[in-house]
Structure formats: structure tokens, C-alpha cells
Amino acid sequence: MSEAIISIQELSKSFGDHEVLRKIDIDVHAGEIICIVGSSGSGKSTLLRCINKLERQSSGKIMFCGKEVRDVQREINEYRSKVGMVFQSFNLFNNMTVLQNCMLCTRKVLHLSKAEAFDRAITHLKEVDMAPYIHAKPSQLSGGQKQRVAIARSLCMNPQVLLFDEPTSALDPEMVGEVLNVMKELATTGLTMIIVTHEMAFARDVSTRTIFMDRGYVAEDAPPSELFTNPKNPRTREFLSRYLAG
Amino acid sequence: MVNLFSIDNPENSLEWMIFLADKYASMFLEGTRLTLLIAILGTLLGFVLGYVIGLIQDAKINQGDNIVKKVLYKCIKIIAAVYVEIFRDTPMIVQAMIIYFGIREANINITPIAAGILVTVLNTGAYMAETVRGGIGSIDLGQREGAWAMGMSPMKTMLYIVLPQAFKNIIPEMANTFLTNLKMTSVLNVIAVQELFMAAKTVGGNYYKYFESYLVIAVIYFVLCFVFNKIFIFMEKKLQGKNDYALAVEYMDNQ
């Protein structure tokens, strides 16, 4: 297999005495769509936040394209500009319009010209069907619309990997579909994605690899066809049966 | 020339007020000018100082930063904290005395007005630093994380995302600070700044009509504060922005 884009090596994270992640090893290769599932408190979101360096790991390291991402602001910034993140709570900039949200970082981080940044913003906003709303402020949009804008905003950076931290958990049931559809579209473009989600059907249908996390460990890491139909780990089985029953 | 307001033989307090205001109009005007000058300049520069100190206090240090940067940061933070404590925990009137006479002691010839502005700036800066810190703290961490996650530096994130939002939240507090300063300039008479209070003291002494003289400046202070307050409320409304937006119809069809 080719070299991993992101390689997580023996990553551990504790909050005080509480160990949230225990020696996580995951290699992410180009084009993979990895869904991370597991019950609340199993460390999924913390893992994702560690991957984006929003949370500092207690030990272990993260390699990007074969090079360690050290805890130096300049290196972190450069790494983050290539690894986008979509949040549960959208985190659109409230003081800016949709268009400004999508142009700010391409202008200030990638130093694109205004015209280039504008073209990119429009292109990606069209992909998520939000182009007509360029003049709206985040507070004037619905949850689903906000999340679609947030996805477009991340895409504007042309990331090599896009992380999703429970992108549909804060949405009304009827809005979940529109965001999942956008993500399904993205999955067909070959973009590498790591998705923390509670949407089991989505994980089963879209991911190329599903990781089940339990109490800070990677309990199972397999293609969805195996993990969902024939889970090896009893914890996975228990989790899935609870989910499918509920 | 007939002047409706000139009264030759004032008998009651109201007439005395009008008489004094008329006779010493230039002194009251000059006092008003100085009061405004010190309050406006002192507050504006104080805001700048307050933002700088507030940002310093909010800055975080990375584990991976080199040792020189860490030590430097720590020192600056301590200096900022000491400054804020000292100026918040002593009265402005005492600060005025100490700064004015302290600088004179050092054989530097500082005018009372310059010293007055300096005191106002330092005082405002200390209070604003806390306000700014609170304002920054009031902005959801997610706003910053959204920018950080796209590779934006903490400094730029502060500049483009956090400060504009924090600024809006602390406008009422900034307005308060300005109004407080406008009135606090009155203590600067102790270092012989010829502001409104000093003018009233002088004028009152001429006829031994202190009550009326101070009533005159009370009215002036009131009018100034009232007008500025209205201006601030207007500005705040302006900054709220529009409630609606136009759909970009040019992008509606080609999806």
C-alpha cells in the first residue's frame, strides 16, 4: 500500500486521571473514507480533535505525509490548512456573511487573490446548493444550511483530508438527510475523509473502512461489510445490536 | 445690545447661575473644551492600551515554543498583570498626584494637561484590559476553532474573528467607561488642570457663589453625558446591521 497521508502512532490522551485515548494506531491512506463509530464517551471526538491538533495528545505522535507534526504553531497552522475540519456546532464565523466565511481563510492563509478566492467559494457553495445565500449571515440560516456552508468553507482550502466531527448530531432529523447527501457526493470525488458519526446506515453505505471505538481503544477496524455483518469483537456486536434494536 | 440672558442684579439662585454662566462663559467653555479633550483623547488611547493588555493576558503559549519566547511571554504577562492591579486598586485622584509630581520630581517638565491625559489613559487601560478579556471570553471557543482548523494563526483569528465580535459585545461597557472618564476628569483639578471643575471653583470664588457655580457645571456635565449617551446608543444600533439579506438570484438556476 502507498504511504499513509496521516499516520497516528501510539496516540494517548488523558484529561487529568481520565484516560480518553489509549495508544491509538491508525494509518489513513489517500481516498479512504473512514467512519469512526462507538458509544458516547468512547473517545471518538477527542481522537478527531487530536488529529487536527485542537487537542494536544499526552503521548504518541501524528505524522502527515511521513513527517511528524510537532507542537510548533507554524507547523500546526500549515498542517491544519491541509487537513480541514467540519464541526458538530458548525462554527461559522458569526460576524461574516456566507461568502466572507468561505473567502476569509483562502485569502488570509493561502493568500489567494480576491477573484480566485471568490471563484472557489462560489464553486464549492454551488456544490452544496448554498450559492444563492452568499449574502446571508449564519444566524439567518437553518442548521442544515449552516453545516453545508461549513463543508463548502472547508473545501475552499482544497484539503487533502477532511475531518467530520459528528456533523449531523446537532441537526433536526429532517435536515440530517441534506447534509448526509452532500457528504455522499463528496465521497464519490475521491476526497479522503474521516467521519465521526452516529449514523450507522451512512457509515455502512459510504465508508471504505469502519472503526469501532470503545473506552479509548480501537476495538475493531474493518471494512463496513465485515464490521456490520460479522463483527469480531463482542463489544462491537453488543453496540451494534443496541443500535439496530433502538 | 439686548441680551435675553444677561442679568445685572441677580437675586435668586437661578439668576445667579445665568449671571455667572454669562459673565464667565469663556472660562466655562474653555473648561468644557479641556474636559472633552482629556476625556476623548484619554479614553481612546486608553482603549488601545486596554486592547493590547487584554490581548497579552489572553495569549497562550505552546508547549513546543522555544524557551526565550516562553520566558519573554511570561515576563510581559506579569508586567501587564501588575499594571492592571495597581491602577485598579488605587484612586485616580491619587494616581494623578503621584504621576504629576513624580514626573516633575524627575526633572521632566510635564504640563498638567499632558499629565491629566496620561493618568486617564493609564486608568482606562487597566479597566479596559479586564473588559476586553471578558469580551474575548464571551465569544464561543468554536469561533476560534473554526478558524484554527483551517490553518489560521491565533493572531489573525483574534483580529478577524474574535475581536470584531468581542468589540460589539463590549460597546456598552466602552460607552460607560467614556462617560465615567468624562466625569472623572474633574479630579484633575488637583494637579491644576483648568477643566470644568476648576473653572467652577474659580468662578464661584469670585462672588462667593459656589452653589450656583457648581450647578452650572453640573448642567454642562449632564448635557455632555446625555448627548454622548444618545450617540453611543445610535452607534450600537447602527452596528447591529441589517436583519434581512437578498438572495443572490444570479446563482439560483445554474445548480
Image (cartoon, helix red, strand yellow):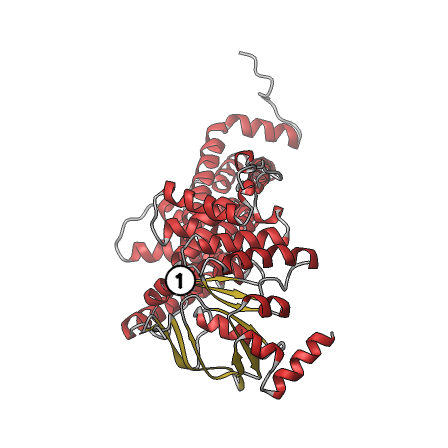
Q: Residue B86: image x %, image y %?
A: 44, 64
State left or right for residue A111 relative to residue B219: left
Q: Residue B36: image x %, image y %?
A: 47, 39
Q: Nearer the viewer, residue A111 or A181?
A: A181
Q: Nearer the viewer, residue A20 or B186?
A: A20
Q: Secondary structure at mark 1?
A: loop
Question: In the image, what residue type sits under mark 1?
Answer: Gln
Image height of B85 relative to B245, above or below = below
Split into 4 quadrants, where in the image is the C terminus of chain A?
bottom right
Residue on which disc 1 sits: A160
Q: Quadrant of residue B103?
A: bottom left
Subunit under mark 1? A
Image height of B148 relative to A221, above or below = above
Q: Residue A109: image x %, image y %?
A: 36, 54
Split into 4 quadrants, where in the image is the N terminus of chain A?
bottom left
- Neighbours of disc 1 within 10 Å: few (<14), some (14-19), many (20+): some
Image height of B190 relative to A7, above or below = above
Q: Residue at x 49, y 52 (%)?
A: A152
